[in-house]
Amino acid sequence: MAKVVVLGAGISGHTAVMILRKKLEKKHEVIMVSPNSNYQWIPSNIWVGIGQMKTSQVIFPLAPVYKRKNVTFKQALAKTIFPEGDAASTKPFVEIEFVEDGKKGQIEKVEYDYLINATGPKLNFAATEGLGPDKNSLSVCTFGHAADAWSKLQVALDKMAKGERQRFVIGTGHPMATCQGAAFEYALNVAFEINKRKLMHLADITWITNEYELGDFGMGGAFIRKGGYVTSTRIFTESIMSEYGIKWIKRAGVKKVEPGVIHYETLDGEMSEIGFDFAMLIPAFAGVGLTAKNKAGEDISASVFAPNGLMKVDADYVPKDFENWSINDWPSKYQSPLYENIFACGIAFAPPHSISKPFKSKNGNPIFPTPPRTGMPSGVMGKVVALNVAESVKAGKTITNHRASMGRMGAACIVSSGYGIRDGMAATMTVYPVVPDFEKYPEWGRDLNYTVGEPGLAGHWMKLFMHYMFMYKAKALPGWSLIPE
């Protein structure tokens, strides 16, 4: 009997554990270790943040699903990986600390034959002074954060209803933050809610971003086919921003957030500030703090993880100039180069470099987006890793026939504003591949037959449909496996 341990019940980890349980016989144990008692469909946190969905609509308890699917669930925090075992045992294990009531604080060693690290990111609010819901800004990164953002947004809307002007600043809260798409979507939804109440004349909405140009989205931007012609995501994004009455500040790295004031640096080296009454800023991402030790108990974290705490996999981490970057630098198996039975997928793996061109300010500080790996790519990675692990268990040796390089993977994104069947609009965009391949597509870096964008109500309907479809899939209800990642 084999033991497969998955760390993290987000999109990537939850997908992996469901695929494993489907592919492996019951004699093999599949173990999920996650500090969260609930699964959350993060893309719909945006709607929680504008009061159009309740938190109960974007989450569900994990334990009943795992019990039904014969997955051992441990509500705990993964602390340290011992890939060689320790002095008492040659069996590899991960040390976990329980967070559930009744077991809180207890430490357990969970042995494994294969380990999948899908822990996702630490929301590194501390990397920016004064950033975060417990300090001076808001977030929609979790359902709790999104609910808090809605309560604060209601206050701002009430003030506007009484004739008081309000300043909204939405965007990235760190010079190297990712998830521009989520912040962009939230900005559009806030503008939609204000317009719906006919209060736009009392609103100043500003988009602040570390992107060199709008529409970069951490992917270096893209050229998309729209209505029979080719345009850039910069023009696509700027036109939508203008239509919604949103101003923008680009090439900006937020350095500090004080009550009512955001301090930022621009690429030209200037230090500036902008006042706000309501600010939602996405933080930097980092590893969750997982460490590794060898058999002697010595810390080997620097070998297993990158400096940001994300796990090294089969990528080319040799530093290179931007002009020498290649899609071949990107991993396809998500397998540790040191331990063949350890994998990392979703946000938990360390990218070899950014996708967007890196820039430094005149003061020498980096200001550019780090790579997005959420949503569809995370699900695909989780599935591919699980398929490889399942086949390895059956074969009795590690095999990796399934691949999912971001340089060979497409992604779909729907940025929706408003809510309902008749109210709303969405900018729908597909990109292939996620990492540009200028060798295969020298003119645009991507295949324009599959890199397209279109605004309209139909995309909004699709976003609503996807919410219910993927919640259904995540609950592992009948036919779940037929729904693609």
Image (cartoon, grey):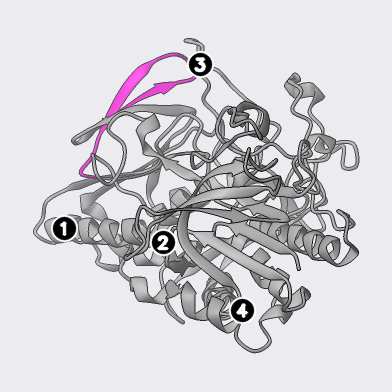
The residue range painted magenta reads 262-278
Say whether disc 1 or disc 3 marks the residue closer to the N-terminus. 1
Residue depicted at 18% across the width and 35% down the height? 259
Amino acid type at circle 1 is Val
In contact (CB < 8 Å): disc 1 and disc 4? no
6 or 441: which is nearer to us? 6
Residue depicted at 60% across the width and 65% down the height? 31
Tell me the tag on residue 361.
Answer: 3
Say whether disc 4 or disc 3 marks the residue closer to the N-terminus. 4
Provide residue 369's location: percent of width, then percent of height: 56, 35
Say whether disc 4 or disc 2 marks the residue closer to the N-terminus. 2
Distance of label 1 from label 3 (alpha carbons): 37 Å
Mark 2 neighbour class, 10 Å CA radius: few under 14, some 14 to 19, many 20 or more: many
Say whether disc 3 or disc 2 marks the residue closer to the N-terminus. 2
Distance of label 3 from label 2 (alpha carbons): 31 Å
Residue depicted at 50% across the width and 62% down the height? 43
Amino acid type at circle 4 is Asn
Which residue in the structure is indicated by mark 1? Answer: 155
Amino acid type at circle 3 is Ser
Answer left or right for 269 relative to 307.
left
Answer left or right for 300 relative to 445.
left
In what element is the residue under mark 1?
helix
253 relative to 426, above or below:
above
Quadrant the C terminus occupies: bottom right
Mark 1 neighbour class, 10 Å CA radius: few under 14, some 14 to 19, many 20 or more: few
Of labels 1 and 4, the one closer to you: 4
In what element is the residue under mark 2?
helix
